[in-house]
């Protein structure tokens, strides 16, 4: 089974960075969180199996979105 590409949207000074999980370096830096989320979503969707993890300014996770086949679909 292919691995899911996990991309984080994190605070970067007074801007927002898109960073692949496990990477120290930002893939891109944006002036707004919304722009960074859009860039992260593009990376995740293009990966086929992707996940975007959006962080708050204090670093805590705000929300997560998965793209592609969900390995743990909800029942019901």
Image (tube, rainbow, N blue to C red):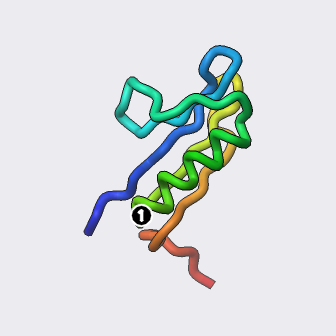
- Quadrant assignment, res 20: top left
Image height of 46 relative to 27, above or below: below
Q: How many marks?
A: 1
Residue 70 at x, y percent in the picture: 47, 70
| 41 to the left or right of 34 | left
Residue drawn at (46%, 34%) of the image: 27
Question: x%, y% of residue 23?
Answer: 36, 31
The answer to whether 36 is drawn above or below residue 71 in the figure is above
Give the residue at the far left of this rendering: 1
The answer to whether residue 53 is above or below residue 60 is below
Q: Residue at x 70, y 17 (%)?
A: 14
- In the image as oriented, which residue stretches furthest toward the bottom? 76
Q: Residue at x 58, y 46 (%)?
A: 39
Name the residue furthest top.
Answer: 13
Q: Position of residue 59 (x, y in %)?
A: 62, 26
Q: Estimate how packed mark 1 is, as few (under 14), some (14 to 19) or many (20 or more) residues with alpha carbons within 10 Å.
A: some
SS of the residue under disc 1: loop
Q: Quadrant of the N terminus?
A: bottom left
Residue drawn at (69%, 31%), measured in percent from left and top?
Answer: 56
Residue 68 position (above or below residue 47):
below
Residue under pointer 1: 49
The percent position of residue 50, horizontal first and vertical second, equals 46, 58
Is 35 on the left or on the right of 4, as rendered?
Answer: right
Quarter of the image containing the C terminus? bottom right
């Amino acid at each position: 089974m292919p691995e899911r590409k996990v991309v984080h949207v994190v605070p970067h000074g007074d801007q927002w960075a898109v960073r692949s999980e496990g990477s120290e370096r930002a893939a891109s830096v944006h002036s707004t969180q919304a722009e960074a989320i859009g860039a992260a979503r593009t990376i995740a969707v293009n990966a086929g199996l992707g996940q975007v993890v959006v962080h708050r300014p204090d670093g805590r996770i705000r929300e997560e979105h998965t793209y592609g086949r969900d390995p743990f679909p909800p029942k019901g």
